[in-house]
Image: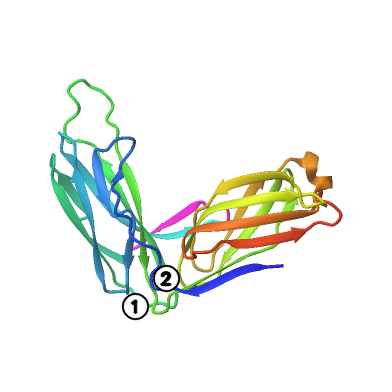
Amino acid sequence: MLAQAAAIVAAAGCLLAMPHAFGGTATINVTPTQLVLPRPGATTSLMLRNESDEPARFQVTGHRWSNTSDGQIALEPTSDLIFFPTVFTLEPRQTRRLRIACKLAASARELTYRLILEQLPALQRPPDGGVQMLMRASVPVFVQPSTLIAKATLAPASFARDEVQVDLRNHGTVHVRVQEIVVRAEDAAGAVLHEARVAGWYVLPEETRRFRVPMPSAICERVRAIGVTATFASGFDKPLVERTPTPAGACGG
């Protein structure tokens, strides 16, 4: 059985109001943590604030964004995004606005990018000769299509080499963000033999994400069903649920 969900949505995810701190400190705050352009040609902005006592120089670059099937980010340099400034200095306690737009024509599906903000080395070396820790942030940018449709399916789970493999396909026109995948292995009486959880990630339009969830091989002969629940941070209010019967056990599935 194939679990699926679909919805016409009013927005492809909400903007987060909490500041993002580069590295492990709150030196540079970036808000919001993702950007949504309602259409090509529209503009938005990113706010950066230097909370430190030292000036910081930054360079900004734009990249097309896709994901591999195992959730790794793939970036390709692009000139689709227009942003200003591209190189700038933030003085101590200074706030700077970075303006962003997309110059492409309207698309049937959401366009996905990332802005990379990289701190440049200081013009003067630290007086103590120490190593300067340079900071980097990657901000998602979504350009929405004319029709916003969230639609995803869960394929039947499979068991192989001490893990359950779960494929989630995005058939919609906008991204979804999976919060968590929960896998439960059940015996013939429906008792849960093992439960495992893995964190989710963005699944962009027309992408398939394969989640690999550890499962002890010692129980595979006793498994008679594998239940999968996918919950979402954005895209859907309700989870996707899929249950795969394994009458002969899950070994070698």
Where is residue 15 shown, x and y percent of the image?
33, 59
Task: Name the residue tied to disc 2.
Answer: 110
The magenta span reads 69-79
Asked if residue 63 lies in the magenta stretch, the reply is: no
Q: Check disc 1: other Cα within 10 Å, few if <14, some if 14-19, many if 20+.
A: few
Classify residue 30 as left or right of residue 8: left
Report how far apart the C-alphas of labels 1 and 2 lie in the structure: 12 Å
Disc 1 vs disc 2: which is toward the camera?
2
Task: Report the quarter where the C terminus lies.
Answer: bottom right
Task: Name the residue tied to disc 1.
Answer: 105
Task: Using the image as rendered, state which of residue 33 and residue 105 is in the foreground.
Answer: 33
Please name the residue shown 38% across and 61% down the image.
113
Classify residue 205 as left or right of residue 192: left
Where is residue 237 shown, x and y percent of the image?
49, 64
Q: Check disc 2: other Cα within 10 Å, few if <14, some if 14-19, many if 20+.
A: many
Please, what is the three-letter code of the amino acid marked with disc 1?
Ala
- Say which label, 1 or 2, has the lower sequence index: 1
User: SS class of the residue under badge 2?
Assistant: loop
User: SS class of the residue under badge 1?
Assistant: loop
Classify residue 49 as left or right of residue 184: left
Please name the residue shown 61% across and 57% down the image.
229
Task: Report the quarter where the N terminus lies.
Answer: bottom right
Task: Using the image as rendered, state which of residue 47 and residue 128 is in the foreground.
Answer: 47
Where is residue 244 shown, x and y percent of the image?
74, 60
Position above or below: 130 against 115 = above
Identify the image quadrant of residue 14: bottom left
Where is residue 170 shown, x and y percent of the image?
54, 67
Identify the image quadrant of residue 29: top left
